[in-house]
Image (cartoon, grey):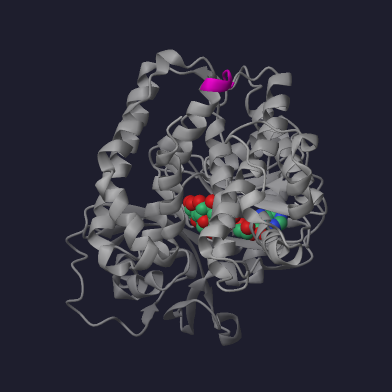
Amino acid sequence: MSTAKEKKKSEVAPPKSYTFNGPWEQLLEDDNFKKVFLSDVLENYVQKQRWYGGKSSKLKYIELQEYFRIQQREEVYYGLLLEVNFEEAFYQHYFLPIAFVSDETFAEKDRILPVTINGISGFIIDAVNLEAFRRLVYERIITAEPNDTTRVRYHCSDTFRPDPYESSRFMGLEQSNTSVIINDTSVIKFFRRIYADKNPDYEMSRFLSERKGYKNTPAYQGSLSIMDSDNVNITIALMQELVPNQGDAWEFMLRELNKIFANLEYKGIDIGNLPSVEIFQRLKIREVPPEIIDWAGLNIFLKLQKLAERTAEMHIALGSEFEDTAFTPEHFNGDYEVWLKNRLLYMFQNRLNTVENNLHRLEGPALELATEFLERKNEIRKRFVNFDWTKLKGERLRVHGDYHLGQVLVEGDDFYLLDFEGEPESTIRDRKVKQPPLKDIAGIFRSFHYAIYATIFNNDGAYPFPREALFQAGELLYRYFIGVFLEKYVYLIQEHNINIGYSAERIFLLKYCMLEKAVYELGYEMNSRPHWAVIPLEGIRGIINDKN
Ligand SMILES: Nc1ncnc2c1ncn2[C@@H]1O[C@H](COP(=O)(O)OP(=O)(O)O)[C@@H](O)[C@H]1O
Ligand SMILES: O=P(O)(O)O[C@H]1O[C@H](CO)[C@@H](O[C@H]2O[C@H](CO)[C@@H](O)[C@H](O)[C@H]2O)[C@H](O)[C@H]1O
């Protein structure tokens, strides 16, 4: 491994190419190559990648944490685990598979460094671009030995009946990892940001689909992991069934909401006269007033019930384990309370700081709300401190952890739940802590609220009503959405003896987790799309103004 001292940057100009007089299979044993490769060459490359998560920090230097061979017979690629160190005194790990290609047509994308190896000129590129690499990984997974104990481990699920390799292509969607589609039936997701542990997406996918037979997530088919020098199992790639779909539930919800808001004019609805309902009141569809059904249509409520059903089934599966301690349910206790409060107070402080430092980037209602957020900081902090485990009787389970409409695929009238990696900001250990399942419910409710506000903001002027009236209609609709969802969800959860507490406990946890999520979102938006910060700020105000 090269040292930080060796890597003091930018004293020499970046090399234009590298010559190695040995075979490709020995390239990474050449210290000089590593020095050149890890210099500005890789730094410049990495910082341009979509999957690079350090864009708001200052890169100091890159070290090669581990490397391993991804190999089948004579065909060899390298998997690199890069440690990216930042000026701000933290680091992140990334996975980069590399290949050597001499034919330029294979190196149209993601060229990292021109090299000459044993007299043959070519390029080092990101291997994911090569069909041969994707094929090799697929074939190694489907032919994996049942109990692979080698350092580079491939695993194939007993429940998977693979076909021989035929084709592969990039998923081509906006994402933080890199997914490729194999044979139009499987998806291999190469994790880019790597954590020194089993990835929760792998753990949850395998647990839910292989062990519990939960049908509404893509079936686990296999994986690639490595044992690092400390004997820790690190997930590198996850292979799952490709679920045919018509897009995600976020896009679906935005389309539905646009129709619902357009109906206000089209159906001549008097917003001030629409019947109201208590927030968190459970509602069967027949209890939703006819005026609301007439306005929003029955279909959206049927869809919400279906989503509630699939969500409840996920939690029922997650709450039904009695052997594997990574998944067995637990009760609230003092340790959890201390962990939770520490984490949330730290996050809250970080948000205050971010908002204070970025007030100048906000204007109009966002600025007003952000100022109110800062003024009411003690009130919000008190809400986070107000958590007393001795009053809570429900269970904690492994949960989705970052449940929102963008993590749900729509397939006909049904839904598939995806991406169990957890909140990008949390540490890997925190993501595996058992939480009240209502944390996920709070996540999806925040997403309903987001979708309602995004519809109003994105379609400025499209609905001929004052903005305040649209907010009023939106808040009302939100109450009916969550009422219908809650009724179905709580009914199913209780029918399967998962203890999420009595009504007062449930409402306390929902509000607590919704405030947590909205404060989390405020940081996410300030960092990635400040013009959306107004949405979580509205959410925070709504939650703290509700005194019950
Ligand atoms: N198994 C799958 N079947 C169909 N589409 C999928 C599957 N896995 C992912 N997708 C699509 O790819 C997108 C990104 O996947 P996701 O797992 O959320 O990636 P990332 O963790 O990199 O953000 C999803 O929103 C979904 O549209
Ligand atoms: O999907 P990711 O794991 O990357 O989640 C992050 O990005 C999400 C945005 O893509 C962000 O979600 C927030 O915006 C959504 C609309 O774009 C909304 O549906 C969610 O409710 C809201 O939280 C998520 O918080 C973040 O972790």
Q: Is residue 391 visible?
A: yes
* Residue 472 left/right relative to 334: right
Magenta-highlighted stretch: main secondary structure? loop
**How many numbered markers are drawn?**
0
**Closer-to-camera residue (212/166):** 212
Q: Position of residue 384 (x, y in %)?
A: 35, 32
The residue drawn where x is 33% and y is 66% is 362
Quadrant where ligand 1 appears: bottom right
Q: Could you say which quadrant of the image residue 284 lies in?
A: top right
User: Which range of residues does the magenta coloring cover?
Assistant: 500-504
* Residue 360 left/right relative to 321: left
The residue drawn where x is 64% and y is 48% is 477
Q: Position of residue 79 (x, y in %)?
A: 49, 58
Q: Position of residue 1 (x, y in %)?
A: 30, 55
Q: Is residue 425 visible?
A: no
Magenta stretch containing residue 371, yes or no? Answer: no
User: Considering only vertical position in the picture, is 128 above or below 205?
Assistant: below
User: Considering only vertical position in the picture, is 501 above or below 360?
Assistant: above
User: Considering only vertical position in the picture, is 417 above or below 43?
Assistant: above
**Closer-to-camera residue (93/271):** 271
User: Considering only vertical position in the picture, is 483 above or below 195?
Assistant: above
* Residue 115 left/right relative to 329: left
**Closer-to-camera residue (79/299):** 299
Q: Position of residue 89 (x, y in %)?
A: 22, 53
Q: Could you say which quadrant of the image residue 158 lies in?
A: top right
